[in-house]
Amino acid sequence: MSADPVSSRRATAPFSYRLDARDGPARAGVFTTPHGDVPTPSFMPVGTLGTVKGLVMEEVAAAGARMVLANTYHLYLRPGHELVRSLGGLHAFMRWDGPILTDSGGYQVFSHAEIRQVRDDGVVFKSHLDGSSHMFTPELVVDIQRALGADVIMAFDECPPGGADHAHAREANRRTLAWLHRCRTRFDELKARGGYPAQTLFPIVQGNVHDDLRREHAGQVLEAGDWQGTAIGGLSVGEAKPDMWRTLELLDGALPADRPRYLMGVGYPDDLLEAIARGCDLFDCVAPTRNARHGTAWTSGEGQVNLKAARFREDTRPVDPGCDCGTCARYDRAYLRHLVVAGEWLAIRLLSVHNLRFMVRLAEEARARVGDGSFHSWSRAWLERYKQGETR
Ligand SMILES: [Zn+2]
């Protein structure tokens, strides 16, 4: 095996974003990467450990997913980024030839790691697996992501919790900006050495729900480089929904229109539409597969349902009569309920197939609606039906 089998077969196509249509702040575009085009808005399934839990990548592709996410923190701890590199990089390792984005590990370190010390030079944490001690620096996080070889890699950031006060959020912004400069320096150094896959580095805008901090940080981040896209971090971390929507409206005016905006960790179907309505393009969340593990499925007419409910015992309809996934094509609620109640693995697989397709298709439909100028009326009606169904 050559030292760098991934880059040797990879085209050197540049990253680009084409904005095709707007409907108010909502946008439809195409994000081009070396591993293919991603029509936006787009929902990215999360393959934390290099696997979208329970599904083979052919099923992920069949759900219409174009770009998947994997996680730096988890893959660094297990199996280790150098092993992944030696096996040809993450695309080859997980058998996915489409675009991949790796999260920098900032969020995981701040949310999963047991003990941590946040310093200006990095974060000291204990592995959630075995308690071993580690330190993430901006440079190491870039090194790990270069080794994994994803198309889009993320800068290391400090992500304070939802209720962080102004002083805490301000300090996190300062550190995140300093780390961004260091990530960029490291990224440019490694790129200049060559022999690596074509990648682009996205910065993460923080600032919690403090308007002045969001505005200031967005300006500082954009000044720090000519980025191919920008990530919005620090939302969907426990803040109130109206604060999240207001923050997105503020950022819509602050971020460049000709680059994709990636809203990290969002979300559920209603959140997806609300965020698209405020100018976001890329989304990721573990909810489709996590909900499936809890026996939960999304429907357009009844909102989120749990298949354990007794009312599905003799229900011979598909999970969502309007869905075009393989689960809805072949199986009814009565059978799925039986599998969920019996704790069968197949329940998780079948519901994962459905939930993933549900989110991907919602983004696809939003894209079409932006294209024909009907997004806002369509999404309002969709949300109303979805929420009414939930309260029935
Ligand atoms: Zn379905």
Image (cartoon, rainbow, N blue to C red):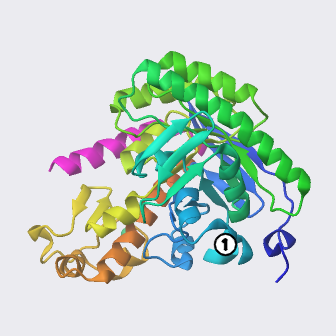
For label 1, the residue is 84
Q: Position of residue 315 (x, y in %)?
A: 17, 74
Residue type at tag 1? Val
The answer to whether residue 372 is left or right of residue 355 is: right
Depth check: give the residue in front, 234 or 82.
Answer: 82
Residue drawn at 64 percent across, 73 percent down: 96
Is 297 above or below relative to 124? below
Depth check: give the residue in front, 392 or 337.
Answer: 337
Most extreme residue toward the left is 310
Q: Count neighbours of disc 1 (C-alpha within 10 A) and say few if under 14, some if 14 to 19, many if 20 or more.
A: many
Q: Is residue 94 magenta?
A: no
The answer to whether residue 220 is left or right of residue 57 is: right
Residue drawn at 26 percent across, 83 percent down: 344
The chief SS type of the magenta part is helix
In which quarter of the view is residue 387 placed? Answer: top left
Q: Position of residue 184 (x, y in %)?
A: 76, 40
Secondary structure at numbered mark 1: helix
Query: Which range of residues does the magenta coloring cover?
Result: 371-392
